[in-house]
Image (cartoon, rainbow, N blue to C red):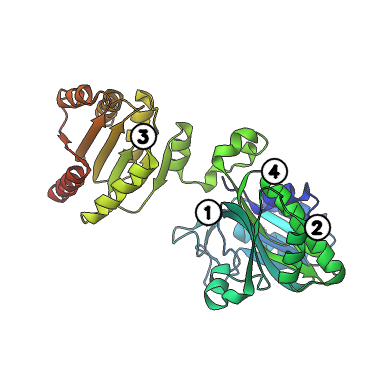
Amino acid sequence: MNIHEYQAKELLAKFDIAIPAGFAALSVEEAVAGAEKLPGPLYVVKAQIHAGGRGKGKFKELGADAKGGVRLAKSIDDVRADATEMLGNTLVTIQTGDAGKQVNRLYVTDGVDIANEYYLSMLVDRATGRIAMIISTEGGMDIETVAHDTPHLITTITIDPATGFTDADGKKAAAALNLSGDLAAECEKLTANLYKAFTSLDCEMLEINPLVESADGKLLVLDTKMSFDGNALFRHPELLPLRDETEEDPAEVEASKYDLAYIKLDGDIGCMVNGAGLAMATMDIIKLNGAFPANFLDVGGGATKEKVTAAFKLILSDPAVKGILVNIFGGIMRCDIIADGIVAAAKDVNLSVPLVVRLEGTNVEQGKEILANSGLPIVSANDLGDAAKKIVAEVKQAA
């Protein structure tokens, strides 16, 4: 689960991490009211969307010369003008794609006199199985560019889970940023608190870009992204209200209501599979046969008929889908339940695209019998390779 910048900063502040003063706003009036509470005379007006590159982004509805999604305002009137332009318009960044995202929220913060900018993030490093802290003196830039062009400017500190974040880790972080004296001590405290926040909140990723040294010698989190492990949210009911469903794909929001793992892709063959590994293999073999999957959809190992029906409807809600491949290996999941769900959903939505089903495992014969007696034009497959070839052929023939 992702959250907005202002929400992430509010969470970090609870862990004694310094952030500039700021106020979230859903309207121009709220943006102006927030600015009036700040000392000024410099304000920053930030679009709040779940995407990076906001400062370099462009608004679809505004001219090419218009400012992006992060703006410096030198007066309350500037705040009002920027908020009026940004709210309700569509911001396109390198991470949103051409469709962009509509700006429904703003964050108005106090301006900061910046002496230096740094980069700092934390994530789970799959290679080591540990939390890694990634640090660079090149803050404010795309870290991917830094990693490609100047990898020697990036330091990675892996943290031993047996000891947690230690004083030695904090000193390494300060050294990587070339800090000394009071700033080094402040960095050691900051990084320890960031680790505490990361582990306490079950984060997947915490990125600060930039972390800045202010002109008066303080370290401040100027911008941040935070995402959480969805499988751990049951431990954090306080985080659930932070979810902004308007920032998510409507189909993925619908899928979450039925505990379905769904991700929309750019192809035209819908997939319904049980098991993430099998789903990946199914997508691979579709591509191997010259087509592209329209989605990743894992119904899980213990799906009910209602859950399968919901999954099937979800696939068909995508207008790009020209055919569907169902690939089920029944262990805990029974093939007859899958078959009942397929038939119910296909009849309910008046199926109009080719459907190929491969069933194997528990109650497979009962499942095949249900499909055969459904009166629907369902193509049966013997194995995964056969299923992929058949759905690709059916889609080509239908076209």
Contact between labelled residues 1 and 2, with CB atoms less than 8 Å apart: no
Q: How far apart are marks 4 and 3 (CA)?
A: 33 Å
Question: Picture quarter containing residue 18?
Answer: bottom right
Q: How far apart are marks 3 and 1 (CA)?
A: 30 Å
Determine which residue is flagged by label 4.
200
Residue closest to the eye, 334 or 372: 334
Say above or below: 49 vs 136: above
Q: Position of residue 34 (x, y in %)?
A: 77, 53
Q: Bin the neighbour count of mark 3 within 10 Å (Cα to Cα): few under 14, some 14-19, many 20 and up.
A: many
Contact between labelled residues 2 and 3, with CB atoms less than 8 Å apart: no
Residue found farthest to the bottom: 149
Q: Which amino acid does label 2 sit on?
A: Lys
Q: Which of marks 4 and 1 is in front?
A: 1
Residue closest to the eye, 201 or 40: 201
Q: Which of marks 3 and 1 is in front?
A: 1
What residue lies at 33% left-to-right and 29% top-to-bottom? Answer: 331
Residue 250 in the figure: left or right of residue 330: right
Determine which residue is flagged by label 3.
311
Q: Earlier in the sequence, mark 2 or mark 1?
A: 1
Determine which residue is flagged by label 1.
126
Residue 112 in the figure: left or right of residue 46: right
Q: Position of residue 298 (x, y in %)?
A: 38, 38
Q: Is mark 2 on a helix, strand or loop?
A: helix
Q: Is mark 3 on a helix, strand or loop?
A: helix
Q: What residue type is labelled 1?
A: Arg
